[in-house]
Image (spheres, grey):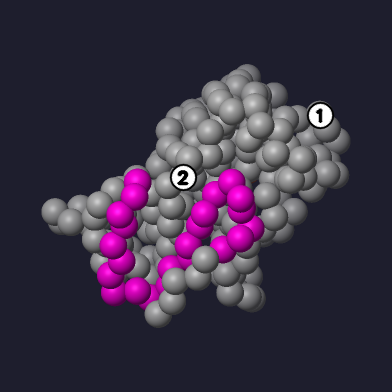
Amino acid sequence: MSILSLDFAEPFFHIDFVEQEESCHIAEKSMIINLAEYEQENILLEGDRVILPLKAAVVQDMTLRNLVRAFILKDFESCDLQNPETVEAIQRSWKTLYEMSGLPRHKGLPYYKSPKFCIGSGNRHMELNLCFVSEGMVPSGPHRDHDRDFDEVHAQILGYGMMRVYEYEDNEHIHQELNMAPGIVHDKMYDSEGKYPWHEYKSVTPCVYCPIELDRH
Ligand SMILES: [Fe+2]
């Protein structure tokens, strides 16, 4: 049973990491991301509603129950992406996607990543960070493989974005667009063996999203 205040996205986002808490009252408007994996690990809201595993919700003045593992992004809307000073501060503090990955396809992209936060170690450990995209309508580049073997989903925090799924690498034959507004985590794209279709994140507006990576080994 613990509530840990995290600093990996400070001073822009104030995130609590909650584990094995029977109940937790949320006073100010906050985003809850259920980081549990299994069906029986729903977070219970008032009025018989639930937050399913690897899904999120925006709540205010509500008591939550059965928090097995969750992020609480407190007063997340206080990070104002319309404020040029905030935007410049994030760009100064976080590394670009290209600096993080070194991949040629990421060069020049207006994507900025916070440091990572890791949960657990070894099999099924989880890695999370936040990613800021300073411009709308910028794709991140189709890919099918990652630097490690993990299951990934993305939670939209601020602004709008989408996960695009392609039939081929040419990013013209779109199979699916999974649109995301704040509080939406797109459905899983990987199969039971961890194989992915070609896919990419694309900003619609300037935005912040949270990649969630669950190690498969
Ligand atoms: Fe990916």
| Image coords of residue 212 (percent x, y) | 56, 54
Indicate yes or no whether the magenta region holds residue 20. Answer: yes
Residue pointed to by mark 1: 108
Question: Is the residue at mark 2 in contact range of ligand 1, meaning its CB lies under 8 Å from it?
Answer: no
| Image coords of residue 190 (percent x, y) | 54, 49
Question: Is the residue at mark 1 in contact range of ligand 1, meaning its CB lies under 8 Å from it?
Answer: no
Label 1 or label 2, whichever lies nearer to me, is 2
198 on left or right of 42? right
Amino acid bearing label 2? Phe
Residue found at the very far left of the displayed protein:
47
| Image coords of residue 171 (percent x, y) | 65, 24
User: Is residue 174 visible to the viewer in this orientation of the structure?
Assistant: no
| The C terminus - image quarter | bottom right
Indicate yes or no whether the magenta region holds residue 199. Answer: no
Q: Which of marks 2 and 1 precedes in the sequence?
A: 2
Does residue 123 sit above or below 10 in this rendering?
A: below
Q: Secondary structure at mark 1?
A: loop
| Image coords of residue 74 (percent x, y) | 43, 52
Q: Which residues are magenta?
A: 6-29
Question: Camera-side residue: 190 or 9?
Answer: 9
- Taking the spot 34% from the left edge, 68% from the top edge, the residue there is 67
Which of the numbered marks, if any, corresponds to residue 22?
A: none
